[in-house]
Image (cartoon, helix red, strand yellow):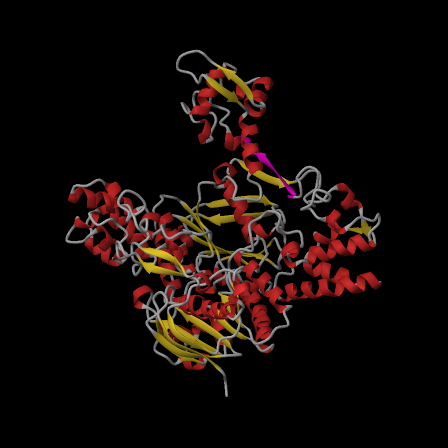
């Protein structure tokens, strides 16, 4: 008899007091439209409770040094075992973290070279995180930051005309006044006419302390060259979050001393069988795996099997094109997740519950097939897999599917279907209808005929790009496709350097705290507060829960966090404002019989009928157009699902008037029904004569494009070529294209 995880009365977030049983030791997919409650069930309920109960089983002494976890809002859960989450969260953005350090492969390579290398050095002498091993110039980072002079200065302007583009030196600002006070420069002279001495002083001067007694000037000051000052700020922030504003004025290049190797000359000179450790860390993983097989001897035999075991798992996970020296911060979310998967393949524990968050994100359909093999390996070791996923190939492969819905937000949180893929196909649900092809994505009318000219890139050579020439039709939808590591992100990076006015919608976070809400992120709340305050006769500042009008007890959060010691932190409704966020006298004011707190509780769709202000309607209509009408105006952004967060960002960008839009995998986190809606939004953009470029693997999006550029044929060094370009139908006829092969199957299936 199959063992079950039994859940009774789950009410976390939008879950509607659900009760269900989930089979263990099986491949279980949890699906449903974006915002339906999938993550609430998988992560916030099952994983959270499994982790909490495991930690509670430890001694009180041990629990003192581990994080406390709040109890999920559920009556009971039975049948839980220790759980491991494999999500899309970064492994860390520290520039010193590499594929080799997070997998410990580099640790073992250092050990190998310290034992077999000539001349002999210690293992720590190969570490770029230690003074004895780090490169003398870049201190182990592998790169240098250099100013982009044309981004930083307008050489056709004078200092009085604002030749320094950085806001710190804006005309009439403090640092601009310091330049004036020095008397060093002719403020009306174009920078292009500066002498070499004048340019060096403006750009690179060391700090000079001086005074100026003339009225209207800074009296006591320290003058420092613009570039010198900015370089100090950048160097101070290395390894931390960095100064994001300053970064736009700099470019990174490989350290000229170590060529990106990170280690010093002593370590670079040590060799084993004629190869340095630098040679090995710059090999692609599949190449390194083959090379290490040829190293023999008692020391090598003790170290290499463990390294090759890790490398083998990484190859199986579809990231064999990476190098050991690759910085973790440059990996995509999908690559990070596959790296986490590779590490789990080496774990010998059984009986675990693996909870995975969209493991196909960022994967080409060809790579999805490999991924399914890895997940099967985990299951066959005696583990349970709970996979939050929308990909049809994964759903068809599952042993069991749980479909949550029927809608999103308040309209979701119910179990609308459960069973085998065959049983789900028979159900009258959105998932069942799309799986059975009773319902299909609406085909958009292609408009390549309207493309009159092209955006061009010539000789693209960044990373693995093979000096390629690319043309992208204007006023059309272009899809950039290819297997993982084929060069898509590199091509976009080159494109954005030339077309810097493009509006980019990427996968970075939209809000990390409880004070960020959809209404503030899209600027709608500014207009709402102005409208409200004008009607009731108070200052707009009183209507912000982050300032003057905030409840003094909870500081505008609406709840208080109670430290329950070993039982974890618990959120308790604020006793003062009862979750309304504001001080009581602010709530005495009503607009159309609604308090400002009532307004924040409205859904976006409800607010659209409540307000008549054109600015408010324009901002909220964009949110509704991307399928987020069910969100409340005051919902914290850090509680949104991945798909919801991506669409909030898309909505905020749509307010901009831009002719070029670059979307990075906009289908991430989207159910196929939501993809239909996304295509409608994209189509509206194209109809308004915008150029839309989408980096995407989803075949429904690709098949609806006007133009497709397929990179490959493989990842890493074997990628970076244009395999095919043309209409989706032309790509489908290209046998050498992996994308074409899958498109051909899709077109054939749609005809059936």
Against 105, residue 175 (above or below) is above
Where's residue 54, x and y in %? Answer: 51, 70
Against 19, residue 690 (above or below) is above
Towards the viewer: 214 or 252: 214
Q: Is residue 235 left or right of residue 566?
A: right
Q: Quadrant of residue 562?
A: bottom left
Q: Which residues are magenta?
A: 141-149
Q: Residue at x 62, y 69 (%)?
A: 345
Against 211, residue 624 (above or below) is below
Name the residue at the front extreme. Answer: 61
Towards the viewer: 334 or 577: 577
Q: Is residue 4 left or right of residue 231?
A: left
Name the residue at the top extreme. Answer: 214
Tell me if I can see residue 443 in this picture.
no
Towards the viewer: 13 or 487: 13
Q: Quadrant of residue 448?
A: bottom left
Where's residue 485, x and y in %? Answer: 59, 56
Is residue 288 highlighted in magenta?
A: no
Q: Is residue 541 left or right of residue 433?
A: left
Tell me if I can see residue 623 in this picture.
yes
Where's residue 273, x and y in %? Answer: 83, 54
């Amino acid at each position: 008899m199959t063992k079950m995880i039994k859940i009774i009365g789950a009410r976390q977030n939008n879950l509607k007091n659900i009760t269900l049983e989930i089979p263990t030791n099986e491949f279980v997919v949890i699906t449903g439209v974006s915002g339906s409650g999938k993550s609430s069930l998988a992560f916030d309920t099952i994983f959270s409770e499994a982790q909490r109960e495991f930690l509670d089983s430890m001694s009180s002494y041990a629990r003192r040094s581990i994080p406390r976890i709040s109890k999920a809002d559920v009556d009971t859960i039975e049948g839980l075992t220790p759980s491991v989450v494999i999500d899309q969260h970064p492994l860390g953005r520290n520039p010193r973290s590499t594929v080799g350090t997070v997998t410990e492969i580099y640790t073992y390579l250092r050990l190998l070279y310290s034992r077999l290398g000539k001349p002999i050095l210690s293992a720590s002498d190969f570490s770029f995180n230690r003074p004895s091993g780090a490169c003398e110039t870049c201190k182990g980072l592998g790169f240098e930051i250099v100013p982009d002079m044309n981004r930083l200065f307008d050489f056709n302007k004078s200092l009085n005309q604002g030749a320094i583009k950085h806001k710190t030196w804006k005309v009439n600002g403090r640092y601009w006044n310091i330049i004036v006070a020095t008397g060093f420069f002719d403020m009306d002279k174009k920078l292009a006419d500066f002498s070499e001495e004048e340019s060096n002083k403006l750009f690179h001067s060391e700090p000079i302390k001086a005074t100026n007694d003339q009225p209207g000037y800074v009296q006591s000051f320290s003058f420092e060259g613009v570039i010198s000052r900015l370089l100090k700020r950048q160097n101070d922030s290395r390894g931390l979050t960095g100064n994001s504003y300053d970064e736009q004025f700099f470019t990174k290049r490989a350290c000229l001393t170590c060529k990106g190797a990170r280690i010093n000359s002593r370590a670079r000179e040590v060799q084993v069988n004629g190869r340095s450790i630098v040679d090995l860390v710059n090999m692609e993983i599949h190449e390194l795996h083959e090379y290490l097989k040829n190293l023999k001897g008692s020391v090598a035999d003790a170290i290499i099997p463990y390294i090759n075991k890790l490398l083998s798992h990484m190859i199986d996970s579809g990231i064999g094109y990476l190098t050991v020296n690759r910085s973790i911060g440059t990996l995509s979310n999908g690559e990070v997740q596959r790296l986490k998967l590779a590490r789990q393949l080496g774990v010998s524990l059984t009986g675990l519950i693996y909870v995975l968050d969209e493991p196909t994100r960022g994967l080409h359909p060809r790579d999805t097939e490999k991924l399914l093999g890895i997940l099967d390996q985990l299951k066959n070791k005696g583990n349970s897999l709970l996979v939050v996923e929308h990909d049809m190939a994964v759903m068809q492969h599952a042993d069991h599917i749980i479909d949550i819905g029927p809608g999103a937000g308040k309209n979701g949180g119910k179990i609308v279907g459960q069973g085998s893929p065959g049983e789900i196909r028979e159900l009258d649900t959105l998932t069942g209808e799309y799986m059975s092809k009773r319902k299909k994505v609406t085909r958009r009318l292609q408009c390549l005929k309207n493309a009159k000219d092209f955006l061009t890139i010539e000789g693209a050579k960044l990373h693995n790009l093979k000096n390629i020439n690319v043309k992208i039709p204007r006023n059309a939808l272009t899809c950039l496709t290819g297997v993982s590591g084929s060069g898509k992100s590199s091509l976009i990076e080159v494109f954005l350097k030339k077309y810097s006015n493009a509006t980019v919608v990427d996968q970075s976070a939209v809000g990390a705290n409880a004070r960020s809400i959809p209404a503030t992120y899209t600027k709608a709340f500014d207009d709402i507060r102005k409208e409200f305050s004008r009607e009731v006769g108070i200052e707009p500042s009183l209507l912000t829960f982050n300032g003057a009008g905030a409840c003094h007890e909870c500081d505008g959060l609406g709840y208080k966090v109670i430290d329950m010691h070993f039982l974890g932190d618990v959120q308790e409704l604020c006793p003062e404002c009862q979750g309304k966020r504001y001080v009581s006298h602010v709530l005495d004011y009503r607009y159309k019989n609604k308090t400002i707190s009532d307004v924040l509780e409205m859904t976006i769709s409800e607010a659209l009928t409540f307000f008549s202000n054109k600015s408010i309607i324009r901002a909220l209509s964009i949110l509704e157009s991307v399928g987020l009408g069910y969100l409340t105006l005051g919902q914290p952004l850090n509680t949104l699902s991945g798909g919801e967060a991506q669409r909030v960002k898309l909505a905020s960008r749509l307010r901009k008037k831009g002719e070029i839009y670059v979307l990075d995998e906009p289908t991430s986190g989207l159910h196929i029904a939501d993809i239909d809606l996304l295509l409608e939004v994209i189509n509206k953009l194209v109809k308004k004569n915008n150029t839309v470029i989408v980096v995407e693997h989803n075949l429904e999006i690709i098949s609806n494009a006007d133009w497709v550029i397929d990179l490959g044929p493989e990842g890493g060094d074997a990628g970076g070529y244009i395999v095919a370009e043309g209409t989706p139908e032309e790509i489908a006829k290209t046998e050498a294209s992996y994308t074409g092969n899958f498109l051909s199957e899709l077109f054939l299936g749609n005809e059936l």
